[in-house]
């Protein structure tokens, strides 16, 4: 069982979804509300952050996810403490869960959430703080954030996770017949996981930050008595044993299945926190919840309260465990097993057995003062020393103090040289010996080191971990002691990896065009006159834009998905690669950021999305400029698109991407920088980030999409056309032009608030070479052929003429002169370079051609699929899904005829703007 792959709450809004069956979790969130409010107030009062970063770990999705955000926002603006109210605060929320979580559901519910927050605050005469919500996929047992970047961590009903084993015959958890050795394995796994969890968070939390954790626990010290949780899993075990007796489930399958949940006691949690010297517990509370969670719900007529409770608890358990049960036993038993469980739970409720509730434990931590300084030293050290310092809290106080002193002043006290024998053994003569084995610190640090240093060089295997030998050598030099005995028999060399190289394929069909915009420092330094008005983030009161609701690239991986039909966009990304690399290097050299924040606006999903991320990482790794190489840099990527984008697809592809990145870097003997990837839903025509927070903005083939159909373009003003065509009235073309000017100016204003002084911006847009707005080359041709297809369907009576006349695509191809003029009007920016490139209209000339099919036919089918991937959502929302197959078949035929004709062909023109 692989937790990151197999485990998630049930998605969507169906009868058995988590969104519909999470009342217990909601009660837990509400019960912890006073502690959360107290933590928020203390961070505001003690730290006075201008931008407060808050992370919800194990957020899942549905109303409970946004309930926590609502609590924080309400706390900040309802509290009457003047220190809070007068603070010009912005809030950045990160919602974290495993990559298989339904992040799409969260992002698509944000618009309604923002409207409710605005209405609620307006009723009280308050204005909600500017706030920004991002999704962050990954296990919270690994690093998720840059060092010292989070003010408040929150986690509710999430922390216990991960255990395997087949020694627990007939049980799926810690039951009455579970051997003590199995219970001890559960306990050990939790101690290891929770210790690692705390270590990761200590690296990421700011000095003085808070952490509020709520977990399902137990009152008793007896690990076999977890109250209601034990009861629930025993009843589920009973159901599986019934299916085994009926021959529906193999006994071996049951015996090898163990639920990865552990309910700790308050004493266990306290002890583990105390072992982590960086944290102090400021508050710990226990409360118990009635298992009959449906006493506040309607009871169906003719059913008993016990029956309702059984059905309800079965649905609640199903949303949490179905993914695990299905991955192990298959989906065929789901209905039967949860029906049996409901019956068993009803019998339990009706019995005379004394009932136990579910024990909930809430803890609040604060970073201890003395250790704040110690931990913060990590971010100021050279990279190799800093990685070693991450291990130090586990070495003991004596060695920790010595190492920090040595690392802080490396030139004054050179460490003794490390001598190695000719073989793979190690000479440790003349050095002290560490009292504790290296395995005591290797276990906790292994994940962090592994992600920073791929195993290309020799490595040492310790316990269940592998650390790079060069890191251990560095640590020995730092301490002046030998941490390990002679490992001559235990040093393993990793097999050499095949160098696949980084594909940066040439674009023979492109004629490249390029540019730069410079941000004035006066505004950022508070001395300039060009102050921009403060604007709230998206969702603040205006009517929802149709494009945000209806527009997205086609999801998934099927024949007509964007992931399978975006070669033209890939060419644009590759063509702009030299400009992106230059921008990344300049940010590194000019600004020397310890944390570099990079945003990709209009990211969509699929291989192209992560291609840009790969380019940035590769540039930082490969560049031989010492300024870059010596900088202990971490990178935070934000991938932005409209809420309807398939963020789930991106997040579920990150694991493979990370493996590929480590592989590529290891082949070249390089180390990828620590990097973190988050998804950020919202329109880039609104505020997306806190002020002065982003070093590099990138956008490829997105900004030509308007925020809406041009204002005042009504009815049949553009009769028979869906864009700017040959018969479009000049007045309609002017409306398109005005809408782009308004939108692009707004875009630049938003980015100027968010970019750091000296930051860069690289924008790639579909444009036009000609000043004539009616002549956008290949783009005009594509939309004209699509218009022809719709007119054909009108003539056949398949589409109403009024429907065609009222449909206009919110897309505008600007000229280079238009872009320059709009940038120059924004006095905070200067253009440094601008280039034009042209893409051949045959987007699939590099694809396989089916036998017996002409090249022009292949080109028609290919372009039809590419256009459909981009346009289907808008067309379906206006005309309905019934015409899709026919329309794009007609388009493919028309495009084939166009390619075969003698008409002079035009490519798709693009403009690339790079700004600083």
Image (cartoon, grey):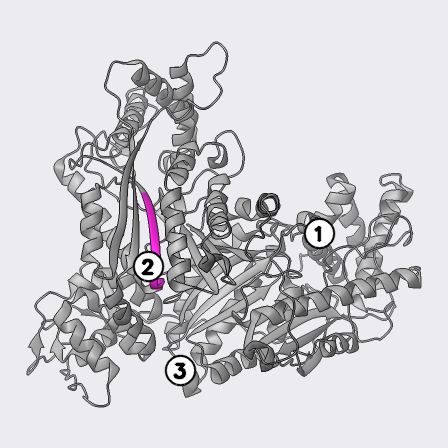
Which of the two labelled residues, at mark 2 and mark 1, occupies the earlier sequence position? 2
Write the residue at 79% across / 72% down: 768
CA gap between label 3 and label 1 equals: 43 Å
Dot 3 or dot 2: first in sequence order is 2
Secondary structure mostly seen in magenta is strand
Can residue 416 be seen? yes
Mark nearer the viewer, 3 or 1: 1
| Above/below status of 19 relative to 720 | above
Of circles 3 and 2, which is in front? Answer: 2
State the residue at coordinates (35%, 44%): 158
Number of numbered labels in the structure image? 3
Q: CA distance from mark 3 to mark 2?
A: 26 Å
Q: Is residue 207 magenta?
A: yes
Residue at the limit of the structure toward the top, as seen here = 302
The residues colored magenta run 204-214
Q: Could you say whether the residue bearing mark 3 is in a helix, strand or loop? A: helix
Residue under circle 3?
629
Which badge, 3 or 1, comes first in the chain's sequence?
A: 1
Under circle 2, the secondary element is helix
In the image, which disc is placed on residue 201? 2
The percent position of residue 665, horizontal first and vertical second, equals 40, 73
Q: Label 2 crowding class (10 Å Cα cut-off): few <14, some 14-19, many 20+?
A: many
Q: Which residue is mark 1?
A: 547
Q: Secondary structure at mark 1?
A: helix
């Amino acid at each position: 069982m692989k937790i990151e792959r197999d485990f998630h709450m049930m998605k969507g809004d169906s009868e058995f979804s988590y969104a519909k069956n999470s009342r217990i979790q909601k009660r837990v969130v509400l019960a912890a509300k006073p502690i959360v409010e107290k933590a928020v107030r203390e961070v505001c009062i003690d730290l006075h952050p201008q931008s407060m970063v808050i992370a919800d770990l194990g957020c899942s999705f549905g109303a409970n996810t946004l309930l926590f955000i609502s609590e924080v926002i309400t706390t900040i603006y309802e509290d009457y403490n003047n220190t809070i109210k007068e603070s010009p605060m912005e809030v950045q929320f990160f919602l974290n869960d495993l990559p298989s979580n339904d992040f799409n559901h969260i992002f698509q519910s944000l618009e309604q959430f923002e409207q409710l927050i605005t209405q609620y605050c307006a009723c009280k005469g308050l204005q909600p703080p500017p706030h920004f919500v991002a999704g962050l996929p990954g296990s919270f047992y690994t690093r998720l954030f840059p060092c010292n970047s989070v003010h408040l961590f929150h986690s509710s009903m999430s922390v216990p996770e991960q255990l395997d084993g087949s020694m627990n015959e007939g049980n799926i958890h810690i039951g009455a017949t579970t051997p003590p050795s199995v219970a001890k394995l559960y306990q050990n796994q939790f101690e290891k996981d929770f210790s690692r969890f705390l270590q990761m968070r200590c690296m990421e939390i700011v000095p003085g930050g808070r952490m509020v954790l709520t977990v399902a626990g137990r009152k008793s010290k007896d690990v076999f008595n977890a109250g209601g949780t034990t009861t629930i899993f025993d009843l589920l075990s009973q159901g599986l044993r019934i299916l085994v007796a009926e021959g529906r489930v193999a006994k071996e399958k049951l015996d090898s299945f163990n639920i990865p949940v552990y309910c700790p006691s308050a004493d266990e949690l306290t002890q583990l926190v105390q072992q982590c010297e960086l944290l102090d517990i400021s508050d710990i509370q226990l409360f118990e919840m009635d298992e009959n969670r449906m006493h506040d719900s309607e009871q169906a007529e003719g059913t008993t309260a016990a029956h309702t409770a059984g059905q309800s608890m079965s649905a609640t358990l199903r949303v949490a465990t179905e993914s695990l049960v299905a991955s192990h036993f298959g989906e065929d038993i789901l209905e039967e097993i949860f029906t049996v469980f409901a019956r068993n739970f009803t019998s339990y409720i009706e019995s005379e057995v004394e009932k136990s509730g579910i024990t909930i434990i809430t803890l609040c931590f604060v970073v201890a003062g003395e250790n704040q300084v110690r931990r913060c030293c990590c971010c100021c050290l050279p990279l190799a020393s800093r990685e070693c310092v991450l291990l130090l809290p586990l070495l003991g106080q004596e060695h920790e103090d010595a190492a920090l002193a040595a690392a802080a002043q490396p030139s004054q006290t050179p460490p003794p040289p490390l001598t190695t024998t000719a073989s793979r053994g190690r000479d440790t003569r003349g050095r002290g010996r560490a009292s504790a084995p290296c395995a005591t610190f290797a276990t906790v640090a292994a994940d962090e080191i592994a992600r920073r240093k791929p195993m290309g060089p020799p490595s040492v295997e310790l316990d269940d971990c592998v650390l790079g030998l060069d890191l251990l050598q560095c640590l020995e030099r730092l301490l002046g002691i030998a941490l390990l005995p002679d490992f001559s028999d235990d040093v393993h060399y990793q097999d050499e990896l095949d160098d696949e190289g980084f594909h940066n394929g040439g674009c023979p069909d492109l004629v490249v065009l390029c540019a730069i915009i410079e941000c004035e420092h006066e505004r950022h330094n508070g001395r300039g006159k060009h102050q921009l008005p403060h604007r709230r983030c998206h969702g603040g009161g205006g009517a929802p834009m149709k494009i945000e609701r209806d527009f997205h690239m086609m999801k998934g991986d099927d024949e007509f998905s964007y992931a399978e039909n975006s070669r033209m966009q890939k060419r644009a990304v590759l063509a702009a690669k030299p400009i992106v690399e230059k921008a990344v290097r300049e940010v590194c050299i000019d600004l020397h950021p310890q944390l570099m924040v990079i945003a990709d606006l209009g990211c969509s999903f699929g291989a192209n999305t992560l291609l840009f991320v790969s380019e940035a990482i590769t540039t930082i790794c490969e560049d031989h400029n010492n300024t870059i190489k010596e900088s202990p840099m971490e990178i935070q990527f934000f991938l932005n698109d409209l809420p309807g984008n398939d963020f789930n697809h991106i997040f579920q592809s990150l694991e493979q991407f990370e493996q590929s990145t480590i592989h590529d870097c290891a082949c070249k003997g390089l180390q990828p920088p620590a990097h973190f990837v988050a998804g950020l839903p919202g329109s880039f025509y609104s505020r997306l980030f806190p002020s002065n927070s982003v070093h590099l903005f990138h956008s490829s083939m997105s900004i030509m999409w308007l925020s809406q159909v041009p204002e005042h373009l009504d009815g049949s003003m553009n009769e028979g056309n869906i864009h700017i065509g040959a018969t479009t009235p000049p007045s309609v073309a002017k409306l398109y032009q005005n809408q782009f000017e308004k939108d692009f100016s707004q875009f630049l204003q938003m980015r100027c608030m968010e970019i750091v002084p000296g930051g860069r911006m690289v924008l790639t847009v579909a444009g036009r070479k000609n000043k004539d707005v009616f002549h956008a080359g290949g783009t005009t041709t594509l939309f004209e052929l699509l218009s022809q297809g719709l007119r054909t369907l009108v003539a056949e009576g398949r589409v109403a003429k009024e429907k065609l006349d009222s449909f206009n695509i919110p897309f505008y191809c600007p000229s280079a002169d238009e872009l320059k003029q709009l940038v120059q009007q924004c006095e905070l920016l200067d253009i440094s370079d601008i280039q034009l490139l042209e893409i051949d209209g045959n987007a699939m000339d590099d694809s396989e051609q089916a036998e017996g099919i002409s090249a022009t036919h292949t080109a028609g089918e290919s372009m039809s699929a590419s256009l459909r991937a981009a346009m289907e959502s808008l067309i379906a929302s206006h005309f309905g899904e019934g015409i899709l197959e026919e329309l794009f078949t007609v388009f493919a035929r028309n495009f084939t005829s166009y390619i075969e004709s003698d008409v002079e062909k035009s490519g798709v023109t693009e403009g690339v703007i790079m700004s600083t």
